[in-house]
Image: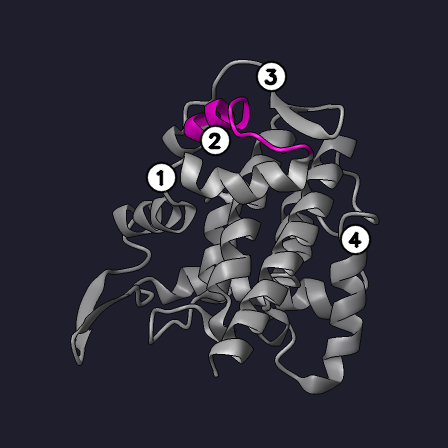
Amino acid sequence: MLLAEDLLLLALDPDAGTPVNSSREPLGVALCGALVAELGLAGLVEEDGRRLAPIGARPDHPLLADVHAALGTVRGRRAADQLRRLDSAIGGVWARVVDGLVDAGVVGRRRDRVLIVRITHHPVLRTEVRDEMVRRMQAAATGDGPLDARTATVLALSGPSRLLEVVAPARADRRQAKTRIADATEQTPVAPIVRKVIQEAQQAAAAAASTAVIASTASG
C-alpha cells in the first residue's frame, strides 16, 4: 500500500469510519506529504531552492502520477506552501486516497443522514490490514530499535496528524512516542530529499492543526 494509505488507515476509527481526534485538516496536509515522500523514496523528487520539483518519468500509479505532475505546477515560495496547495491540485487528497482503499476493499463507503446533513463514513472492512499496520506503528513509537524508511515516514507524520493516542494508546508510553516521532527520520537512513519533504509536511500539518483549533475555539 501507499504511505498515504497507511497514514489514513491509522487515522480512521475502524468502526465509525471517520478520523479520530478531529484530525481531518492536519491529516490532509500530512497525506500530501506522504505522497510526495513516496516519490522521494523512488528518486522522483528533488529540491529546487526552497521548493520541491519532480524529476524522472511519471510513475505508473495514477495517484502518484498526478502528484508528480502537480508538484511541478503548484505555486508557493517554499515546499510547505506546495504541500498545502497540492490537495486541491489533485482533486482532494482525502477523496483520492480513500478511493484507492475502497477500490482495494480495505474500507467501505457508507452515507448516513444526520438531520439534514449527509455524512460519509468509511468503516474498515479488512480489519486485519489495519490491525497489522497499527501494531507496527505502535511498536515503532514505543520501541528503541532501528526503523525502515517507510515505517519512519508514517511515524514522523503521525504526530502532526494528531495520532499520538493511536500510536501510543497507553499514557505512560507517550513521552517516548513523542521522542520517536520527532527523531524518526533523523535516525533512519533516508535520502535528504525525503527528510526535507517530511520536515516540511510536519510544519505545514502542525500549522493546519493550530488553525483548526483556533477556528473551533472561535466558533464555540
Q: Position of residue 68 (x, y in %)?
A: 50, 25
What residue lies at 66% left-to-right and 63% top-to-bottom?
159
Query: Marks 4/3: CA distance?
Result: 29 Å
Residue tagged 2: 67
- From the viewer's perspective, is residue 76 above or below residue 115? above
Q: Is residue 143 visible?
A: no
- Disc 1 or disc 4, which is closer to the eye? 1
Q: Is residue 166 left or right of residue 99?
A: right
Query: Residue furthest toward the top?
Result: 57
- From the viewer's perspective, is residue 3 above or below residue 45? below
Do the residues under discs 2 and 3 have CB atoms within 8 angstroms?
Answer: no
| The one of 52 and 116 positioned closer to us in this rendering | 116
- From the viewer's perspective, is residue 59 above or below residue 167? above
- Pick whichever of labels 4 and 2 is earlier in the sequence: 2
Q: What kind of residue is marked 1?
A: Gly
Query: Residue furthest toward the front?
Result: 218
Residue 42 colored magenta? no
Q: What kind of residue is marked 2?
A: Val
- Pick whichever of labels 1 and 4 is earlier in the sequence: 1
Q: Is residue 156 left or right of residue 161?
A: right
Query: Marks 1/4: CA distance?
Result: 36 Å
Give me the disc on residue 146. 4
Residue tagged 3: 55
Query: Marks 4/2: CA distance?
Result: 30 Å
Residue tagged 1: 91
The span shown in magenta is: 65-77
